[in-house]
Image: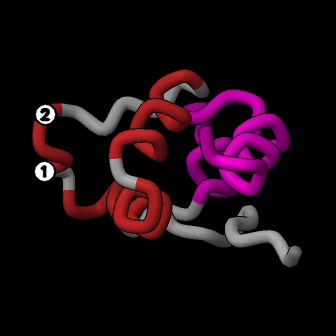
Amino acid sequence: MPERFGPGSKVRQVVEALGEPGRQALRKHGYDLGDGFVDVLSQYQTLEHAARTERLRDLDGLLAKLNGPQS
């Protein structure tokens, strides 16, 4: 099965595709979506950029979680 998400995936794509499990995965890796995800610019930030700017920890681990079987 091909990977669904990669470093170039946008935060918004993760949240839209996975809903609350996607939000939780991002949160566990240090990305704070805030209340209602109102920061429009961060919605379009790539996962790679978020990791580079230290808004996200362990990009490889997050991608493994996002692309793994959803529980």
Q: x%, y% of residue 34?
A: 22, 33
Q: x%, y% of residue 27?
A: 46, 27
Q: Residue furthest bottom?
A: 2
Amino acid type of the residue that numbered disc 2 sits on in the rendered structure: Asp
Residue found 38% across the figure and 64% down from its top: 12
Amino acid type of the residue that numbered disc 1 sits on in the rendered structure: Val
Magenta segment range? 47-71
Tell me the quarter of the image containing the N terminus. Answer: bottom right
Give the tally of numbered discs: 2
Residue found 13% across the figure and 50% down from its top: 38
Magenta segment's dominant SS is helix
Residue found 76% across the figure and 31% down from its top: 58
| Pointer 1 residue | 38
Q: Quadrant location of residue 24? A: top left
Q: x%, y% of residue 29?
A: 60, 27
Tell me the quarter of the image containing the C terminus. Answer: top right
| Pointer 2 residue | 35
Q: Secondary structure at mark 1?
A: loop
- Height in image: 61 above or below 13? above
Q: Quadrant location of residue 18? A: bottom left
Left or right, residue 34 beside residue 32:
left
